[in-house]
């Protein structure tokens, strides 16, 4: 018999793993019944619809995770945990589930913190639905720094650093069309309506051919591609970013 790790012996199992194991076994039972119906050509069979469980267990927190340990004989102080599982359709799952689409590591939250973001800080932001730089910028625009700091319980100075770095322009795409027709796509959360930033690279101005919804499209000269560009948003907000795909800009210090 496999010996359980000391943590599982003392604290039990993480609550999410318990739910996953339970639903996985229900899925197996459902799949087995479906195979039996197809092979046996049964006109009628049974299906799992609703499952209700009443558990006596001890609930505790370990490193921000909820653990369940089933109560043993004579352990009368355990909590009563009631679970009810029902069936849902695939569209319902997709509609209500968190989108875990892979994030470009060049533009990750860890990158926004200069690579120094801890797992605890990432969990704090994830609890309020922030998993990407884009989500962080959107929440800042609608709620403000103080609200984010209060909800995430992150130190204000660390959060301000992340917000400042996340708002720096970054090169999302470069179109190499030859000659002077190349296009550089910048994502710039600090872009203001009716106010284009001034951009310089290699000692010359870089033409802006399109700007909307936090996106800027540049048409640099061939010699400016790959060079460091200065992006002046006005009011003392100046950032620097190399005109190469995947580059994350930094703010210039006064």
Image (cartoon, grey):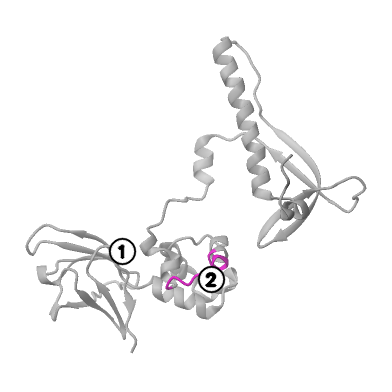
Nearer the viewer's eye, disc 1 or disc 2?
A: 2
Tell me, for residue 35, which label it has, or none: none
Q: Where is residue 232 in the image (x, y as percent from the top left)?
A: 26, 80
Report crowding for label 1: few under 14, some 14 to 19, many 20 or more residues within 10 A (C-alpha): few
Q: Position of residue 161 (x, y in %)?
A: 45, 77
For the point 42% across and 65% down, the residue is: 133
For the point 71% across and 52% down, the residue is: 5
Looking at the rendered structure, the secondary structure element under dot 2 is helix
Q: Is residue 238 shown above or below 131?
A: below
Q: In this view, does 38 lie to the left or right of 184?
A: right
Q: Where is residue 148 in the image (x, y as percent from the top left)?
A: 53, 71
Foreground of the two, 214 or 173 = 173
Report crowding for label 2: few under 14, some 14 to 19, many 20 or more residues within 10 A (C-alpha): many
Foreground of the two, 167 or 221 = 221
Foreground of the two, 142 or 203 = 203
Image quarter of the C terminus: bottom left
Q: Distance between the residues labelled 1 and 2?
A: 23 Å
Image quarter of the N terminus: top right
Disc 1 marks which residue?
213
Disc 2 marks which residue?
148
Q: The magenta stretch spans which residues?
A: 114-122
Q: Is residue 209 shown above or below 93?
A: below
Q: Earlier in the sequence, mark 1 or mark 2?
A: 2
Furthest-left residue in view?
179
For the point 23% across and 74% down, the residue is: 196
Quarter residue 248 falls in: bottom left
């Amino acid at each position: 018999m496999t010996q359980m790790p000391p943590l599982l012996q003392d604290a039990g199992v993480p609550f999410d793993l318990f739910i996953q194991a339970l639903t996985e076994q229900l899925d197996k039972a459902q799949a087995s019944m479906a195979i039996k119906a197809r092979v046996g050509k049964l006109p009628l069979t049974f299906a799992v619809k609703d499952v209700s469980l009443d558990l006596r267990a001890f609930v505790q927190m370990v490193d921000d995770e909820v653990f369940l340990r089933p109560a043993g004989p004579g352990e009368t102080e355990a909590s009563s945990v009631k679970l009810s599982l029902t069936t849902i359709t695939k569209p319902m799952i997709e509609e209500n589930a968190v989108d875990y689409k892979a994030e470009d590591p060049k533009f990750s939250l860890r990158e926004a913190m200069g690579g120094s973001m801890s797992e605890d800080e990432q969990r704090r932001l994830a609890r309020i639905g922030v998993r990407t730089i884009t989500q962080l910028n959107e929440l800042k625009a609608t709620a403000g720094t103080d609200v984010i700091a209060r909800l995430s319980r992150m130190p204000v100075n660390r959060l301000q650093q992340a917000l400042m770095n996340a708002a720096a322009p970054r090169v999302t795409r470069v179109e190499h069309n030859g000659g002077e027709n190349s296009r550089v796509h910048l994502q710039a959360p600090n872009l203001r309506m009716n106010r284009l930033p001034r951009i310089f690279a290699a000692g010359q101005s870089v033409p802006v051919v399109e700007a909307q919804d936090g996106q800027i499209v540049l048409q640099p000269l061939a010699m400016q591609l790959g060079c460091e560009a200065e992006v002046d948003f006005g009011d003392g907000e100046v950032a620097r970013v190399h005109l190469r795909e995947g580059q994350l800009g930094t703010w210039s210090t006064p």
